[in-house]
Amino acid sequence: MDALSPIVEIRHLTKSYRRGGQVVPVLTNISFDIRTGEFIALMGPSGSGKSTLLNLIAGIDKPDSGSLRVNGTDIATLSERELADWRAANVGFIFQFYNLMPVLTAFENIELPLLLTRLPRTQRRERVELALSMVGLTDRMEHYPSELSGGQQQRVAIARAFITDPVLLVADEPTGDLDRASADDILAMLGRLNSEMGKTIIMVTHDPHAARSAHLIRHLDKGELDVTLEH
Amino acid sequence: MHFLKLILRNTLRHKLRTGLTVLGLVVAILAFGLLRTVVDAWYAGAEGASSTRLVTRNSISLVFPLPINYQERIRRISGVTGISHASWFGGVYVTEKNFFPQFAIDPKTYFELYPEYLIPPGDMKAFRTDRKGCVIGRKLATTYGFKVGDTIPLRGTIYPGAWSFTVRAIYDGAEAGTDTSQFFFHWDYLNETMKKAAARRTDWVGVYVIQIADPDRAAEISTEVDAMFRNSLAETLTETEKAFQLGFVSMTEAIVVAIRIVSFVVIFIILAVMANTMAMTARERISEYATLKALGFGPRFLTGLIYGESIVISLAGGLIGIALTFPVADRFSKQMGTLFPVFGVSLDTVYMQIAAATAVGLAAAALPATRVARVSIVEGLRSIG
């Protein structure tokens, strides 16, 4: 897939939730593309639907209607099992609260997604060690998440996200739980993943400072895409 | 490997909670095993019964005796290969608490019918030649510290007076289930003593034990024995030794049923405790399970983690409980003295304990595993802070 072709194609996407018997629309007739290698920030007030949109693109939620092609696959039509396999191969997740397994070391947490591949143990080890060195945590590989700072935990989460070399990284408020220095560190790391490794990154954030790390900022308000800022 | 690692580390995550749950399981499985062993002990007499022995008693009740002259008439029935008799003595050794069964028997014939009672030939000879001698079982000897040559005083209740016997032999059981808590002495000694004290109570025996050649003819021979004494002074009821023993059990069947029910109630209670533990565990980790799902791990992997953890906890508790059942049952048996002649943890009980522990582990994990398998990733991730 060349750099200009869209990796995410969204057409007339609609999503609503049921709350107490009432249907609450979250996304209404959304259509837009994300090109391969883009670093896009989704912004908007709470309840605007930005996390829902991210979840749909990442294949952890399903739309009510519309089409959603990611990396050539219409993921809206996949079964749960197919979606799980698709996510394992195509998407890396970065969460606000890191979501590391507390009983696994940094090394083991990063290795987790590789357990779903057919890679032999030695190759898994090589890859994890490389990822650890890329996020600057080689000396912390045997540490448990509780023994790491927030910034270090998020770096482990980033390593876990790119360890399988997915085409797409989705980050939901990746700096929301970090101080400014750690946040800058994480944003710089995401920037490098985008510029040096060509990863397409979609980041949901409230923080305009964080959003400025992206190439594109798209605003969502009341379930509709608003202004696009490009820089 | 990682799957097992995750299970084991998750199990040890809340050490106090896991420890208390395991402790609960240990107590429950131990209690279950002990109660099953008590039930087994109740049936031990019937289980150890021979299929080639019949017991003839007075048809009105076991309390009423039978004339000694029935013996020769029964011996003549076709298919009968041996006959002896036994009479319940019911004496008290020092205090009523020291209960053990005592029987007045025919020393010449009785032990020929019970090859499972192993007596050294020299001791057997000494017993037969001493009218005041007695044979006691190994468990009885161990319980009260009796040795060959000791004198055992008994206070008669059914046969009043002070009685004194010399231990001439100690018998061992041929099998683990053989009752070695009994006391046997010469019926002649009893009969002759009664001639002096109460002449009308002489020449009676409690039951006849009949040896038959073919177990398949048990019903036929029983019918023939009872027919022989129909309309006589003392009508008889003949049954297999097993049926005779089960007759005793049926007198206390309500207790046995109650013990059985309690043993299952104990398991049900620990199931509730265990299910609560697993439900709490799964609820606390729902975001972790959602994360694993997001990474591409399927519901089978996640339910495997929950079932695995539940099984590890239940089997840990179960195995410790089973290991403790043996010494505790041994101590319990010693405390009970000869109340339970045969009291041992059977292999069947161990299998039932393993099955109970496994069933608790599986059942406790069922609901949380189903919930985790069904929960959506978005919903699970939302449960974070």
Image (spheres, coloured by chain):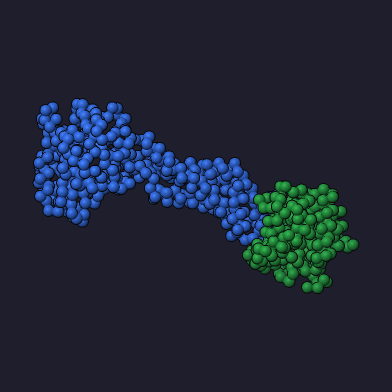
Chain colours: A green, B blue
Q: Answer with left or right where residue A116 lies relative to residue A231.
A: left
Q: Is the N terminus of chain A in the top left, top right, bottom left or bottom right quadrant?
A: bottom right
Q: Residue at x 35, y 45 (%)?
A: B40
**Is A78 or B137 nearer to us in this picture?**
B137
Q: Residue B71: x and y, percent?
A: 12, 44
Q: Answer with left or right where residue A227 lies relative to residue A153.
A: right
**Number of marks present in the image shown:** 0
Indicate whether B327 appears above or below B90.
Answer: below
Q: Residue B273: x and y, percent?
A: 53, 44
Q: Residue B257: x and y, percent?
A: 36, 43
**Is A10 or B318 nearer to us in this picture?**
B318
Q: Residue A2: x and y, percent?
A: 81, 73
In the orientation shown, which residue stands out farthest toward the front?
B122
Q: Is the C terminus of chain A in the top left, top right, bottom left or bottom right quadrant?
A: bottom right
Q: Is residue A141 visible?
A: yes
In the orientation shown, which residue stands out farthest toward the right?
A231
Which of the 4 quarters of the picture holds residue B161?
A: top left
Q: Answer with left or right where residue B275 lies relative to residue B296.
A: left
Q: Residue at x 22, y 40 (%)?
A: B123
**Is A84 or B216 nearer to us in this picture?**
B216
Q: Answer with left or right where residue B129 lies relative to residue B118.
A: left
Q: Is residue A85 visible?
A: no
Q: Residue at x 19, y 30 (%)?
A: B159
Q: Residue at x 77, y 67 (%)?
A: A8
**Is B85 or B327 nearer to us in this picture?**
B327
